[in-house]
Image (tube, grey):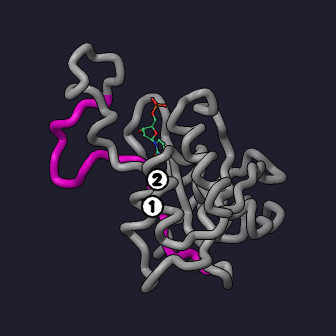
Amino acid sequence: MSEPLETEDFFMHLCSLAAKRSNDPVTRVGSVIVNEDNIIVGVGHNEMPKNSNKFSWEKDNPNPLENKGPYVCHAELNAIVNKNAANLKNCRIYVSMFPCNECAKLIIQLGITEVIYYSDKRANKDYTKASKRMFRETGVKVRQFSPKNEKISIDCDEINGDKSRKRRRPDESDS
Ligand SMILES: O=c1ccn([C@H]2C[C@H](O)[C@@H](COP(=O)(O)O)O2)c(=O)[nH]1
Protein backbone atom coordinates (compact mmCIF):
# COMPACT_ATOMS: atom_id res chain seq x y z
CA MET A 1 0.00 0.00 0.00
CA SER A 2 1.46 3.42 -0.92
CA GLU A 3 1.81 6.29 1.61
CA PRO A 4 -1.29 8.51 2.02
CA LEU A 5 -1.17 11.59 -0.22
CA GLU A 6 -0.87 14.96 1.44
CA THR A 7 -3.72 17.39 0.70
CA GLU A 8 -1.90 19.67 -1.75
CA ASP A 9 -0.13 16.74 -3.41
CA PHE A 10 -3.55 15.22 -3.97
CA PHE A 11 -4.90 18.36 -5.64
CA MET A 12 -1.88 18.72 -7.92
CA HIS A 13 -1.88 15.02 -8.83
CA LEU A 14 -5.59 15.34 -9.54
CA CYS A 15 -4.70 18.10 -12.02
CA SER A 16 -2.32 15.66 -13.76
CA LEU A 17 -5.00 13.01 -13.82
CA ALA A 18 -7.56 15.44 -15.26
CA ALA A 19 -4.96 16.52 -17.85
CA LYS A 20 -4.73 12.92 -19.04
CA ARG A 21 -8.27 13.29 -20.38
CA SER A 22 -7.17 15.97 -22.86
CA ASN A 23 -6.77 15.18 -26.55
CA ASP A 24 -4.24 17.98 -27.08
CA PRO A 25 -1.18 16.27 -28.60
CA VAL A 26 1.22 18.96 -27.29
CA THR A 27 0.05 20.29 -23.93
CA ARG A 28 -2.45 18.59 -21.67
CA VAL A 29 -3.64 20.79 -18.82
CA GLY A 30 -5.71 19.90 -15.77
CA SER A 31 -7.24 22.17 -13.18
CA VAL A 32 -8.93 21.70 -9.81
CA ILE A 33 -10.77 24.35 -7.80
CA VAL A 34 -10.95 23.96 -4.04
CA ASN A 35 -12.93 25.95 -1.47
CA GLU A 36 -11.82 27.23 1.95
CA ASP A 37 -12.69 23.85 3.51
CA ASN A 38 -10.50 21.98 0.97
CA ILE A 39 -13.60 20.65 -0.78
CA ILE A 40 -13.19 20.23 -4.53
CA VAL A 41 -15.76 22.37 -6.33
CA GLY A 42 -14.59 22.05 -9.94
CA VAL A 43 -12.35 19.94 -12.17
CA GLY A 44 -11.50 20.49 -15.84
CA HIS A 45 -9.05 19.79 -18.64
CA ASN A 46 -8.38 21.46 -21.97
CA GLU A 47 -10.76 20.20 -24.62
CA MET A 48 -12.53 21.30 -27.76
CA PRO A 49 -16.10 22.63 -27.50
CA LYS A 50 -18.63 19.88 -26.87
CA ASN A 51 -20.67 18.25 -29.64
CA SER A 52 -18.16 18.59 -32.45
CA ASN A 53 -15.08 16.77 -33.64
CA LYS A 54 -14.46 19.23 -36.45
CA PHE A 55 -11.75 21.29 -34.75
CA SER A 56 -8.10 20.60 -35.41
CA TRP A 57 -5.39 20.34 -32.73
CA GLU A 58 -2.85 21.83 -35.14
CA LYS A 59 -0.96 24.92 -34.03
CA ASP A 60 1.23 25.80 -37.03
CA ASN A 61 -1.31 25.87 -39.85
CA PRO A 62 -0.83 29.02 -41.98
CA ASN A 63 -4.59 29.53 -41.74
CA PRO A 64 -5.10 30.66 -38.12
CA LEU A 65 -8.70 29.45 -38.22
CA GLU A 66 -7.41 25.89 -38.67
CA ASN A 67 -5.32 26.01 -35.48
CA LYS A 68 -6.50 24.96 -32.02
CA GLY A 69 -5.99 28.39 -30.40
CA PRO A 70 -9.29 30.09 -31.20
CA TYR A 71 -11.39 27.06 -30.25
CA VAL A 72 -9.88 25.11 -27.37
CA CYS A 73 -11.62 25.51 -24.02
CA HIS A 74 -8.91 25.83 -21.40
CA ALA A 75 -8.68 23.62 -18.32
CA GLU A 76 -9.43 26.52 -15.95
CA LEU A 77 -12.49 27.58 -17.98
CA ASN A 78 -13.81 24.01 -17.85
CA ALA A 79 -13.12 23.68 -14.11
CA ILE A 80 -15.08 26.92 -13.66
CA VAL A 81 -18.04 25.95 -15.82
CA ASN A 82 -18.13 22.49 -14.17
CA LYS A 83 -18.38 24.08 -10.72
CA ASN A 84 -20.76 22.53 -8.23
CA ALA A 85 -20.85 25.52 -5.89
CA ALA A 86 -22.92 28.69 -6.03
CA ASN A 87 -19.81 30.82 -6.45
CA LEU A 88 -16.02 30.54 -6.33
CA LYS A 89 -15.29 33.42 -3.95
CA ASN A 90 -12.17 32.80 -1.82
CA CYS A 91 -11.46 29.50 -3.58
CA ARG A 92 -7.99 28.35 -4.68
CA ILE A 93 -7.29 27.06 -8.16
CA TYR A 94 -4.69 24.35 -8.82
CA VAL A 95 -3.52 24.09 -12.39
CA SER A 96 -0.83 22.02 -14.08
CA MET A 97 0.33 24.99 -16.20
CA PHE A 98 0.38 28.73 -15.44
CA PRO A 99 -2.98 30.26 -16.52
CA CYS A 100 -3.15 32.36 -19.68
CA ASN A 101 -4.43 35.96 -19.59
CA GLU A 102 -8.01 34.97 -20.54
CA CYS A 103 -8.19 32.42 -17.72
CA ALA A 104 -6.56 34.93 -15.38
CA LYS A 105 -9.43 37.36 -16.07
CA LEU A 106 -11.99 34.69 -15.16
CA ILE A 107 -10.08 33.74 -12.02
CA ILE A 108 -9.90 37.37 -10.87
CA GLN A 109 -13.51 38.25 -11.68
CA LEU A 110 -14.81 35.19 -9.85
CA GLY A 111 -13.00 36.15 -6.64
CA ILE A 112 -10.61 33.19 -6.62
CA THR A 113 -7.84 34.28 -4.27
CA GLU A 114 -4.93 31.94 -4.99
CA VAL A 115 -3.38 30.22 -8.01
CA ILE A 116 -1.17 27.19 -7.43
CA TYR A 117 0.57 25.98 -10.57
CA TYR A 118 3.07 23.28 -11.51
CA SER A 119 4.63 24.18 -14.87
CA ASP A 120 5.62 27.59 -16.16
CA LYS A 121 6.65 26.29 -19.57
CA ARG A 122 5.04 29.22 -21.42
CA ALA A 123 6.65 31.86 -19.15
CA ASN A 124 8.16 33.68 -22.14
CA LYS A 125 4.77 34.24 -23.81
CA ASP A 126 3.08 37.63 -23.55
CA TYR A 127 -0.18 36.01 -22.42
CA THR A 128 1.64 34.54 -19.40
CA LYS A 129 3.36 37.85 -18.65
CA ALA A 130 -0.04 39.59 -18.85
CA SER A 131 -1.62 37.12 -16.41
CA LYS A 132 1.23 37.55 -13.95
CA ARG A 133 0.76 41.31 -14.15
CA MET A 134 -3.00 41.01 -13.60
CA PHE A 135 -2.57 38.69 -10.62
CA ARG A 136 0.04 41.05 -9.15
CA GLU A 137 -2.13 44.15 -9.65
CA THR A 138 -5.27 42.54 -8.23
CA GLY A 139 -3.68 40.82 -5.23
CA VAL A 140 -4.31 37.23 -6.33
CA LYS A 141 -1.67 35.07 -4.61
CA VAL A 142 0.41 32.89 -6.91
CA ARG A 143 2.80 30.09 -6.07
CA GLN A 144 4.50 27.22 -7.82
CA PHE A 145 4.03 23.83 -6.21
CA SER A 146 5.56 20.42 -6.83
CA PRO A 147 4.09 17.44 -5.04
CA LYS A 148 6.51 15.72 -2.63
CA ASN A 149 6.34 12.59 -4.74
CA GLU A 150 6.23 13.79 -8.32
CA LYS A 151 5.32 10.32 -9.52
CA ILE A 152 2.52 8.33 -7.96
CA SER A 153 1.03 5.09 -9.16
CA ILE A 154 -2.68 4.61 -9.55
CA ASP A 155 -3.48 0.98 -9.09
CA CYS A 156 -7.11 -0.12 -8.74
CA ASP A 157 -5.88 -3.44 -7.33
CA GLU A 158 -4.92 -1.56 -4.15
CA ILE A 159 -8.66 -1.22 -3.51
CA ASN A 160 -8.76 -4.98 -2.94
CA GLY A 161 -6.12 -4.51 -0.26
CA ASP A 162 -4.14 -7.60 -1.20
CA LYS A 163 -1.54 -7.25 -3.93
CA SER A 164 -0.80 -10.96 -3.96
CA ARG A 165 -4.28 -11.84 -5.09
CA LYS A 166 -5.12 -12.15 -8.78
CA ARG A 167 -6.82 -9.14 -10.34
CA ARG A 168 -10.54 -9.20 -9.55
CA ARG A 169 -13.51 -7.39 -10.95
CA PRO A 170 -15.12 -5.01 -8.43
CA ASP A 171 -18.19 -7.29 -8.27
CA GLU A 172 -16.18 -10.50 -7.56
CA SER A 173 -16.38 -11.75 -3.96
CA ASP A 174 -13.77 -13.61 -1.84
CA SER A 175 -15.48 -17.02 -2.07
O1 LIG B 1 -4.23 28.71 -19.18
C1 LIG B 1 -4.19 27.83 -20.06
C2 LIG B 1 -3.37 27.95 -21.17
C3 LIG B 1 -3.42 26.98 -22.14
N1 LIG B 1 -4.25 25.93 -22.01
C4 LIG B 1 -4.28 24.91 -23.05
C5 LIG B 1 -4.67 25.40 -24.42
C6 LIG B 1 -3.94 24.46 -25.34
O2 LIG B 1 -4.74 23.26 -25.50
C7 LIG B 1 -2.68 24.12 -24.56
C8 LIG B 1 -1.50 24.99 -24.95
O3 LIG B 1 -0.99 24.52 -26.14
P1 LIG B 1 0.53 24.82 -26.61
O4 LIG B 1 0.68 23.95 -27.82
O5 LIG B 1 1.43 24.42 -25.48
O6 LIG B 1 0.57 26.27 -26.92
O7 LIG B 1 -2.97 24.39 -23.20
C9 LIG B 1 -5.03 25.76 -20.89
O8 LIG B 1 -5.78 24.78 -20.75
N2 LIG B 1 -4.98 26.74 -19.94
Q: Which residue is mark 1?
A: 106
At label 2, which amino acid type do we have?
Cys
At label 1, which amino acid type do we have?
Leu
Marks 1/2: CA distance?
5 Å
Q: Which residue is painted at 42% across and 30% down in the image? A: 25
Visible residue check, residue 129 = yes
Which of the labelled discs sits on residue 76, or is there none?
A: none
Q: Which residue is painted at 53% across and 32% down in the image? A: 126
Q: Identify whether 170 is placed above or below 104.
A: below
* Mark 2 element type: helix
Residue 37 in picture, x, y percent from top left: 67, 84
Determine crowd level at label 2: few under 14, some 14-19, many 20+ residues with C-alpha closer than 10 A: some
Q: Nearer the viewer, residue 2 or 141?
A: 141
Q: Nearer the viewer, residue 52 or 81?
A: 81
Q: Which residues are magenta?
A: 39-57
**Residue ranking furthest to the front:** 137
* Mark 1 element type: helix
Q: Which residue is painted at 43% across and 66% down in the image? A: 80
The N terminus, quarter of image: bottom right
Q: Which residue is mark 2?
A: 103
Q: Is mark 2 within 8 Å of ligand 1?
A: yes
